[in-house]
Amino acid sequence: MFGGVARMTKDSDSPRTEFEVAVAGPLVTLVLAIAFVAAGVISAGWSQVWNAMPYQTPAHTTAFLAVTTWLASINVLILGFNLIPAFPLDGGRIARAIAWKATGDR
């Protein structure tokens, strides 16, 4: 979220390290999104989760279900944004690591 503010004082030593560090953030975001969807499914069932997605929330949706689906949606949006292949976003760092591995040049 604050990639443009963070300063990188040293590049990674290898493309693998760069890739692993860059993938860690989106992976956590994906796990959070899945966890929020799972919490909603456990509490109310899949059809209720689908109906409670933002901007479709029916009046009979519980607060817990509304919050979990909202948090899942936000995490999916953050994941999509972070995977844009533009440096310093995680997607840019992933693309850079792949290019580094493919060419052998930083």
Image (cartoon, rainbow, N blue to C red):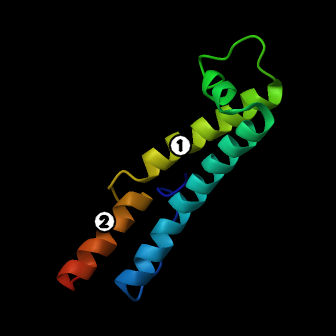
Rendering quarter of residue 10 = bottom left
x then y, percent, for residue 52? 66, 23
In the image, 97: left or right of 45? Answer: left
Task: From the top left corner, tell me how far across and down residue 105 is, in percent.
Answer: 21, 83
Residue type for callout 1: Val
Q: What x and y, as percent, mark residue 93?
A: 38, 66
Q: Residue at x 38, y 58 (%)?
A: 91
* Category of crowding for the residue at label 1, using alpha-carbon neighbours closer than 10 angstroms: few (below 14), some (14–19), many (at least 20): some
Instruction: Pick the residue in front: 71 or 52.
Output: 52
Asked if residue 64 can be seen in this view, the reply is yes
Indicate the secondary structure of the residue bearing disc 1.
helix
**N-terminal-most mark, 2 or 1:** 1
Up/down of 64 relative to 23, above or below:
above
Q: Give the residue number, with chain letter if any, for mark 2.
A: 95
Q: Quadrant of the C terminus?
A: bottom left
Amino acid bearing label 2: Ala
Q: Position of residue 15 (x, y in %)?
A: 35, 82
- Label 1, on which residue? 76
* Up-down relation of residue 48 to residue 36 (above or below): above
Instruction: Residue 106: tell me if it is visible.
Output: no
Residue farthest along the top direction in this orientation: 59
Of residue 21 and residue 45, the one placed in the foreground of this image is: 45
Q: Taking 8 as reference, is 37 above or below it? A: above
Nearer the observer, 11 or 34:
34
Task: Calculate the distance from the C-alpha at mark 2 to the C-alpha at mark 1.
Answer: 20 Å
Q: Is residue 30 above or below residue 13?
A: above
Foreground mark, 2 or 1? 1
| Dot 2 and dot 1 residues touching (CB under 8 Å) | no
- Figure quadrant of residue 66: top right
